[in-house]
Image (spheres, rainbow, N blue to C red):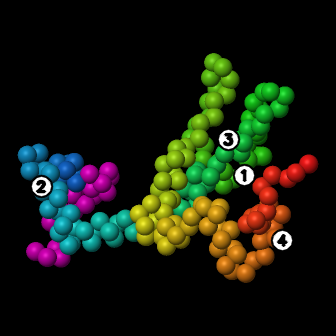
């Protein structure tokens, strides 16, 4: 039967694509509720079903023009949005910007805007979740990003590294040379 799908299998594919829940898809496709979980898992492993699901998902992504870049851009818009993109504080009062004055890419971060009893409420999408998803994609948390694990935020190591690279530390006014070994620590007046 490899390569050929029964009407029930096709119905499973159709139902699975609704919510990506194999158990519920099996039930809606007409399989027994008692065995729906195992049938769902089993169906997802069948090459013809897996291929049909993948083909339909790819087709939907192409039709909707969903690309990795668009998804990442949208996540970045949410993750890097700030309240000041949407409002200003003037004379101690919060003033919401006109939508024409907000950059189009920032509008993706708006979850809702509603008039309430105490004025207008602006709610942004979940910034932490968007940043988490971006970080995971970029491998910032699992050690797969070579830059993420080697970067350090140690001022003393940075200064020492700069000196080793031949950078003249005396030309950087924020960095003072260490005192001579025999120099007095306290100046006499």
Residue carrying label 4: 171
Q: Residue at x 12, y 57 (%)?
A: 39
Mark 4 in CB contact with mark 1 (< 8 angstroms)? no
Which disc, if any, is residue 83?
A: 3
Q: Which mark is residue 103?
A: 1
Q: Which image quarter: residue 55?
A: bottom left
In this orientation, which residue lies closer to the viewer: 29 or 99?
A: 99
Instruction: Residue at 22%, 54% (x, y): give it.
Output: 22
- Residue 57 image point, x, y percent: 37, 65
Select label 4 or label 2 by which is in front: 4
**Sooner in the amino-acid sequence: mark 2 or mark 3:** 2
Question: Looking at the rendering, in which quadrant would you find the N terminus?
Answer: bottom left
> Could you tell me how far apart the alpha carbons at marks 3 and 1 are, in whole angstroms?
13 Å
Location of mark 2 (residue): 38
Looking at the image, tell me whether mark 1 or mark 2 is earlier in sequence order.
2
Label 3: element kind: helix
Provide the secondary structure element on which disc 1 rests: loop
Which range of residues does the magenta coloring cover?
1-21
- Magenta span main SS: helix
Horizontal side of residue 51 vs 67, given as left or right: left
């Amino acid at each position: 039967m490899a390569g050929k799908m029964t009407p029930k299998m096709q119905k499973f594919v159709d139902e699975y694509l609704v919510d990506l829940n194999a158990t519920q898809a099996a039930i809606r496709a007409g399989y027994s509720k008692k065995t729906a979980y195992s049938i769902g898992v089993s169906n997802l492993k069948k090459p013809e079903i897996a291929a049909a699901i993948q083909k339909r998902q790819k087709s939907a992504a192409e039709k909707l023009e969903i690309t990795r870049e668009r998804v990442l851009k949208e996540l970045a818009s949410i993750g890097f949005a700030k309240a000041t993109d949407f409002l200003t504080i003037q004379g101690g009062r919060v003033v919401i910007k006109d939508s024409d004055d907000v950059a189009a890419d920032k509008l993706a971060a708006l979850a809702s805007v509603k008039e309430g009893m105490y004025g207008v409420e602006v709610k942004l999408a979940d910034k932490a979740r968007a940043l988490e998803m971006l970080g995971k994609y970029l491998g910032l948390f699992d050690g797969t990003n070579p830059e993420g694990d080697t970067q350090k935020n140690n001022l003393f190591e940075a200064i020492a590294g700069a000196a080793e690279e031949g950078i003249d530390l005396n030309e950087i006014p924020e960095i003072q040379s260490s005192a001579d070994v025999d120099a007095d620590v306290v100046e006499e007046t």
